[in-house]
Amino acid sequence: MRKALWRTLCCATTLIMGSNAVALTAPQLSEVEKSVQQAMDSFEIPGLAIGIVHDGKVVLAKGYGIRQYGKSDIVDEHTLFGIASNSKAFTATALGMLVEEGKLNWDDPVTKHLPEFQLYSQALTEQMTIRDLLSHRSGLALGAGDLMIWPDTDKSIKEILAGLKHIKPVAPVRTEYHYNNLMFVVAGEVVARVSGVSWHEFIETRIFPLVGINNSYASFSRIDKGNTNFATGTIKYDEQLEEFVGDYLEDFRGAGAISSNVTDMTKWLQTQVNKGKTPTSKQLINPETHQYLWHPQIMRIPNESDRVAFKQDFKGYALGWAVESYFGYKRVGHMGGILGMGSQVAMIPEKGLGVVILSNQHAYPAIRAITNEVFEQALDLEPRDWVLDSYQEFKQKRASLYANMGPKKVATKTASLPLSDYTGTLRSPWYGDVIVEEIAGQLHIDFTHTKLLKGTLHHHDGNTFVVKWHEKLLEADAYIHFKLNDKQQVQSADMEWVNPKITDFSFDFHNLDLRAVP
């Protein structure tokens, strides 16, 4: 966005600086706002909102830019964004409240509350506990099964639960960290079964009011009909920004469906840094439960760049929260991502410090850079141009990734069978039916539970085709490899990403195990 336009669209702010506050000073906040402007300009972010809590006080809640790319409506401190995986902490908190009420225990088997719950083996099913659901240590792979909820499927919770038993694990339970959304969907259903109300109702009636959250929703469809102050996503494709309208991960339920704004999310931050006590001095959860939610359940090895940049010597995942070291401090938070949107919550509890950033462009390096600038100012760290460094690294990586995108070159291409030989219904035991049909000499593919996954098949080599989706902004082109029997009939098919470093991990085509339906 051009700087002049950014200044024009920079909008209403909430700035609270009590006379006795020892929180971030006005000059420090000015440096933060400069980094916001710099990030929006560099990364071409149409709209962004930021909220900061320091020493337990709200020192900034402000919106910048526009809600929809190409439109003039401005972002303010009440503009709704999809917070995506930052919803996971709300689900974990809901379960913590039920633990306090004596309605469940962290180490209850999931089957105690969901008798129909089944995983790939009986042993794994019996081992899985409530605590395991919330800590990405189930043994299921990164994003495994996400196509049941992504993008925008018609799958019911009953169908999702039924599909779990067909997804093969990649590790024994509690041995490895693998980020998995479906376990949080299951956790949301546990909340519903144990409490007697839906996950959505529990979040909106048991958590939001107590915290003082009054303009947030447990899913996009629950936003008040008259409320038009919400953002839409933006995706940069072929070096051009394009609007992408979505439902804020409605199907993710307990894994990522909440819509919120920085005014409400700063209240959530205050509650977190104050050990579960809300801004109105009510106790959402007791300090012991709150501490337990932040206790790492599975450890990870920090990558070399974070170890050097942030002096990071430990990294783990707790219950709905990521926990790591940061310049000698304990840092707690989470990232959230939707096609066209990104969010981050990050806290240094020792300093009563928290930041939330919501944006309508999934430029995660920009969000991280702004967060680091906030922490630099608040913690008096050595000055660094976080946005510039992040942008230069991002630009270099992006150029490299997009220079090499597209199907692999085939020196000598093998002919395919007649196109009609590939037509028919393929069935995944956990996703359902995928239909391949020939229309006017072109193969088409239809993921029957997902409106956005419709596309065409283009011959690549032999019995391998490239799937190109009608919605190009998905950036999820995939190979489909047809497997034939001895009669040269399609027996099965498997899929893989064409551009694995670009495509979102939730497009888990590689887990489908497609079999031809006679």
Image (spheres, helix red, strand yellow):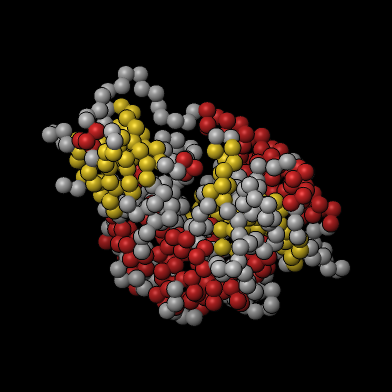
Is residue 95 placed above or below 485 in the rendered structure? below
Residue at image location 44% in from the left, 73% down from the top: 198
In this view of the protein, which residue sits in the foreground, 452 or 107? 452
Would residue 489 be visible to someone looking at this image?
yes
* Most distant residue in the left direction: 487
Residue 21 in which image quadrant: bottom right
Name the outermost residue toward the bottom: 101
Quarter of the image holding residue 264?
bottom right
Which residue reaches farthest top? Answer: 412
Question: Is 173 situated above or below 264?
Answer: above
What residue is rendered at 37% in x and 55% in y?
A: 148
Question: 282 or 457: which is nearer to us?
Answer: 457
On the image, the x and y values in percent for residue 321 come to 55, 60
Which residue is depicted at the point 57% across and 50% down? 233
Residue extending farthest right: 19
Q: Position of residue 78 (x, y in %)?
A: 67, 64
Q: Is residue 12 left or right of residue 101?
A: right
Place of residue 445 in the rendered image (x, y in percent of width and height, measured from the top left): 32, 43
At x 59% / y 73%, what residue is drawn? 208
Horizontal side of 243 relative to 16 (left or right) equals: left
Observer-nearest residue: 387 or 93?
Answer: 387
Q: x, y percentage for residue 82?
A: 56, 58
Q: Nearer the viewer, residue 290 or 495?
A: 495
